[in-house]
Image (cartoon, rainbow, N blue to C red):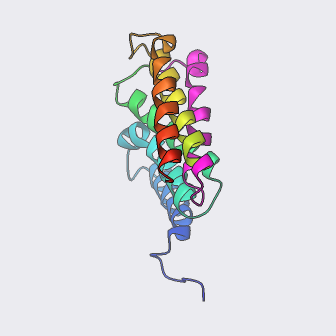
Amino acid sequence: MPNRSLANPRVLPGLLIIALGVILLAHNFGYISLGTFRQFWPLLLVAFGLQMLFTGGSRPLGAALAIAGAALQLDSLGWITLEWRQVWRLWPAILIAIGLGLLLRPARRENRVGGAMLVALGAYFLAANFRLVHFALWDLWPVAIIVAGVMMIRRALGR
């Protein structure tokens, strides 16, 4: 029997849309100012994305929405600077979204390894695009050798 209570996570998007409508209607009639809302609207994207991630929706799209919302929120708070003509710098979020989608699928080792690799690559490229890392990806090539060794040992031990 389906969960028909308001605690059902699938109800969240509808509640958020209703809240948005009420806020905009109250603003139109002069009851509230949208100053604070304008600063925190990206949290709606984060909420929709997380809802999709954890309730069986499209996980890659949910991860992409959550990451995009988080980036826009950081920009709104002034912690990073996003210029709309430079949004292309967020392309690694696609890798992270696909990786999270693989990680959150039913457990298969191939999904976990591939997902973790995509999340790591996406995180590196995203950090590099915002000049948060000061090393080249090529400098990390020995990690591939370490991972290969760990996988060989796991296989030898039957894990």
Query: Residue 10, position in %: x, y?
Result: 56, 69
**How many numbered badges does the structure rendering display?**
0
Q: In which quarter of the image is the N terminus?
A: bottom right
86 is within the stretch colored magenta: yes
* Near-viewer residue (29 or 61): 61
Residue furthest to the bottom in view is: 1
Q: Residue at x 46, y 32 (%)?
A: 71
Using residue 46 as the reference point, say whether residue 59 is left or right of it.
Answer: right
Q: Which residue is drawn at 54% across and 82% down?
A: 3
Task: Tell me if residue 53 comes above or below residue 8 in the rendering.
Answer: above
Query: Residue 77, position in %: x, y?
Result: 34, 30
Using residue 32 as the reference point, say whether residue 102 is left or right of it.
Answer: right
Q: Give the range drawn in magenta.
A: 82-110
Q: Is residue 21 visible?
A: no
Residue furthest to the front in view is: 156
Give the quadrant of residue 53.
bottom right
* Near-viewer residue (93 or 7): 93
Query: Residue 101, position in %: x, y?
Result: 60, 48
Give the quadrant of residue 26.
bottom left
Q: Can residue 33 be seen in this view?
A: yes
The dominant secondary structure in magenta is helix
* Near-viewer residue (48 or 37): 48
